Amino acid sequence: MIHLQTIGGRRIACWLNNGGVLPDRRTLVFIHGSGGDHTNWIEQYTPLKTTYGIVALDLPGHGQSEGPGEGSVSAYCEWVKRILDGLGIVKPVMIGHSLGAAICLAFAIRYGDAAAAVVPVGGGMKMPVNPIILEGLRTDPGAIFALAGKLSVAKPNRDRLSGLLAEALSRVDPEIIHGDFSACDGLDITGTIAGIRIPALVVCGAEDKMTPPLLSQDIRDAIPGARLALIEQAGHFVMLENPAAFNTTLTDFVNSLT
């Protein structure tokens, strides 16, 4: 159920179990990627809502949350902190995809054990974006959306998902997506990521072309005790491409937390 709350002077939207926070359950906080919204996690919150507390955010400027968006991971990280504080969420498991993965990692670096664990999905310590893509978002955004829809999923899943993803991007202000990609492009946490001391599960689609598995392996190697899960038959949108394997991997990790 969508919950709307004024935070930091803006109306912020998120999907919550029955519209409320459930303090008696482990809470999972889902953060979408560039140009996305909470529905990127529909294959997770729909089956998992009976077991966990769910908070699936719309970042500022995305989905039903008021804009503008931001142009840095740090700024989005601060919004996530404000949102969680505003909702009264304590020590959640933070799960983020792409830009959301960067936000989760930045949150764990900045706020330490304010989160119980972190699950970066399709992320990297650096996430450079081709300048042609950034320029294209201003000159021919439709072509960029079509390209992103194609490259972001593994070939067997393209007929099912590529068009839907491209269409979803086309409904977002290109300037907001440009800000999101710029935030990814400016990311560099190579010097600070080793400071993460909470449990970490690093997830990536085995066929991810946008943030290849090597980037996730580097995250795993940089965080003490981190685990790595490569999901077969999936690209960058692993949580939509192979949700059964993704959900099993995620819940096994969450249930292993003390």
Image (cartoon, helix red, strand yellow):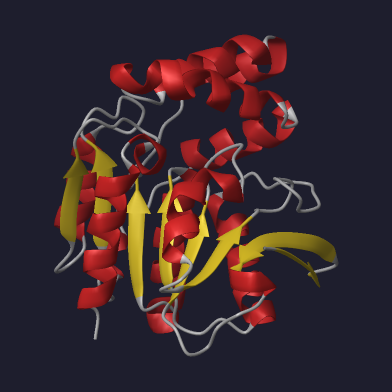
* 19 displayed left or right of 68: left
Task: Please determine whether, in this image, residue 68 is positioned above or below residue 7.
Answer: above
- Quadrant for the C terminus, please: bottom left
For the point 60% across and 56% down, which residue is it? 76
Depth check: 206 or 200 in front?
Answer: 206
The answer to whether any part of residue 194 appears in the image is: no
Which of the 4 image quarters holds residue 20?
bottom right
Q: Quadrant of the N terminus?
A: bottom right
Q: Is residue 15 left or right of residue 65?
A: left
Residue in view at x 24 percent, y 45 percent? 216
Identify which residue, 23 or 244, lies in the foreground: 244
Left or right of 190? Residue 145 is right
Residue at (69% x, 79% y) in the render: 86
* Residue 166 on image: x %, y %: 58, 21
Q: Quadrant of residue 181?
A: top right
Q: Is residue 102 above or below residue 2?
A: above
Residue 105 spot, x, y in % from top left: 39, 60
Q: Which residue occupies 46% across, 25% down?
A: 161
x and y percentages locating residue 207 in the rendered image: 24, 27
Taking 192 as reference, is 121 above or below it?
A: above
Which residue extends farthest right?
9
Q: Percent position (x, y) of residue 218?
A: 19, 47
